[in-house]
């Protein structure tokens, strides 16, 4: 029984780590594309987001670029 609990714990941790890795890879991909926009004004960042919605979710790009989703949708 102890072994089963340990195995379940390891599997759960692995699942969480895979999810975290996927997020980090996504953020890396966004940063590669938007590195020129990191210090740009919000308006320019929103233009970047507008032109890249086919490749990334708006919420993820907003998080990486430190702008609000509500500001983007205004």
Image (cartoon, helix red, strand yellow):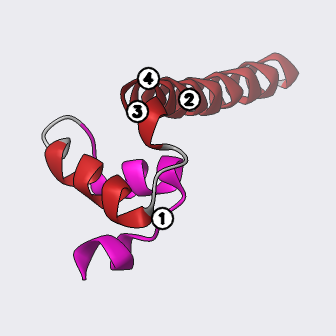
Q: Residue 32's mark?
A: 4
Q: Which residue is mark 1?
A: 67
Report x, y in % for residue 71. Answer: 36, 77
Q: Give how far apart the Cα atoms at labels 2 and 1 are.
A: 18 Å
Q: Give how far apart the Cα atoms at labels 1 and 3 are.
A: 14 Å
Q: Residue 24's mark?
A: 2
Q: Residue 30's mark?
A: 3
User: At numbered mark 2, what does the secondary structure look like: helix, strand or loop?
Assistant: helix
Q: Earlier in the sequence, mark 2 or mark 3?
A: 2
Which quadrant of the figure has residue 52? top left
Numbered range of the magenta stretch? 56-74
For mark 3, does the 10 Å Cα neighbourhood hold few (<14), some (14 to 19), or many (20 or more) residues?
Answer: some
Marks 2, 3: nearer the viewer: 3
In the image shown, does 25 or 69 lie closer to the viewer? 69
For mark 4, does the 10 Å Cα neighbourhood hold few (<14), some (14 to 19), or many (20 or more) residues?
Answer: few
Whether residue 18 appears in magenta in the rendering, the answer is no
Report x, y in % for residue 1. Answer: 81, 24
Q: Earlier in the sequence, mark 1 or mark 3?
A: 3
């Amino acid at each position: 029984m102890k072994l089963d609990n340990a195995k379940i714990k390891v599997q759960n941790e692995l699942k969480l780590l895979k999810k975290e890795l996927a997020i980090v890879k996504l953020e890396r991909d966004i940063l590669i594309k938007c590195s020129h926009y990191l210090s740009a004004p919000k308006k320019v960042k929103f233009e970047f987001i507008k032109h890249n919605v086919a490749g990334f979710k708006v919420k993820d790009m907003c998080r990486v670029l430190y702008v609000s989703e509500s500001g983007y949708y205004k």
